[in-house]
Image (tube, rainbow, N blue to C red):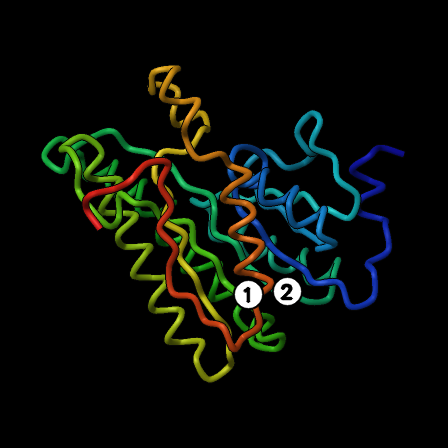
Amino acid sequence: MSDSALALSAPTPAGARVAMVSGGARGIGLAIVRELAAAGWQVSVGARSAAEPPSGAFLPGVLWQPYDATDPASEVRWVQATLARFGRIDALVHNAGILSNHSVLQATGEEFDRVFEVNVKSPMRLTQQAWPALSSTEGKVVVMSSLAAKRVRAPEGTLYGMSKAAVLSLAHALRHCGAEARVRCTAICPGFTDTDMATHVPAEQRARLTRPEDLARIVRLVLELPASASVAEIPVSWCVEPSY
């Protein structure tokens, strides 16, 4: 039996909390999956190529499900598969996203639609699908936004910043929508992080960047806080920022 099959057939520990993590096959997402799994969470990973976990990423109790942020039907199937496997959803981590290096004067309508589809619309739709389950557990939603949502530093990448500002607003909207059911939502706003999106950063500077594991620890802290501690957003930077 393959490792992935073992993960599917492994029994769910009684009382274990369940988290869905989008974009969990690499980078920040994979670091979050590993952090939560190590802490005893049951994790459902949504990724574009999730038929099998990536090499070296097998973790017992982790469900790998295909998820395409441009395909609403895949969002429905992922939520349904998570509930079928674990019976509950305690947390939803919106980590999947795409980058744009174009300014708002360069961006085409097609690129705008693609960036906002992945970075904003899919998290909104996924939350709608998971909301009944989250409401029944006083669950948590974590939205991976960006410091680009909070300040504009250069023309290039301003389309990306617009999408991250929109998803930051989504996080605050969900925070208010969850008040009665005590579903808490937190936006994490990292700056440069040592992932493949930072390959253009000079090597001597990259060694000082925020690590994916740093953000994973913050996500776990937020998810494990009681509903009596509502945290709206957490900006994170590898250096001292002058703009917020």
Q: Which residue is mark 2?
A: 89
Horizontal side, residue 185 vs residue 120: left or right: right
Q: Which residue is mark 1?
A: 130
Q: Secondary structure at mark 2?
A: loop
Q: Residue at x 51, y 51 (%)?
A: 218
| Mark 2–mark 1 CB contact (< 8 Å) | yes
Image-quadrant location for residue 97: top left
Q: Residues within 10 Å of mark 2 (few under 14, many from 20)?
A: many
Report the quarter where the N terminus lies: top right
Quick check: 43 above or below 30?
Answer: below
* Amino acid identity at mark 2: Ile
Q: Secondary structure at mark 1?
A: helix
Q: Residue furthest bottom?
A: 180
Q: Position of residue 216 (x, y in %)?
A: 55, 45
Q: Residue at x 80, y 47 (%)?
A: 8
Marks 2 and 1, how far apart at CA: 7 Å
Image-quadrant location for residue 169: bottom left
Front in this rendered view, residue 202 or 6: 202
Q: How many discs appear?
A: 2
Quick check: 148 above or below 103?
Answer: below
Q: Residue at x 49, y 34 (%)?
A: 211
Horizontal side, residue 191 vs residue 30: left or right: left
* Amino acid identity at mark 1: Ala
Mark sitting on residue 244: none
Instruction: Give the mark nearer the N terminus: 2 vs 1.
Output: 2
Q: Position of residue 137 (x, y in %)?
A: 62, 74
Q: Residue furthest front?
A: 240
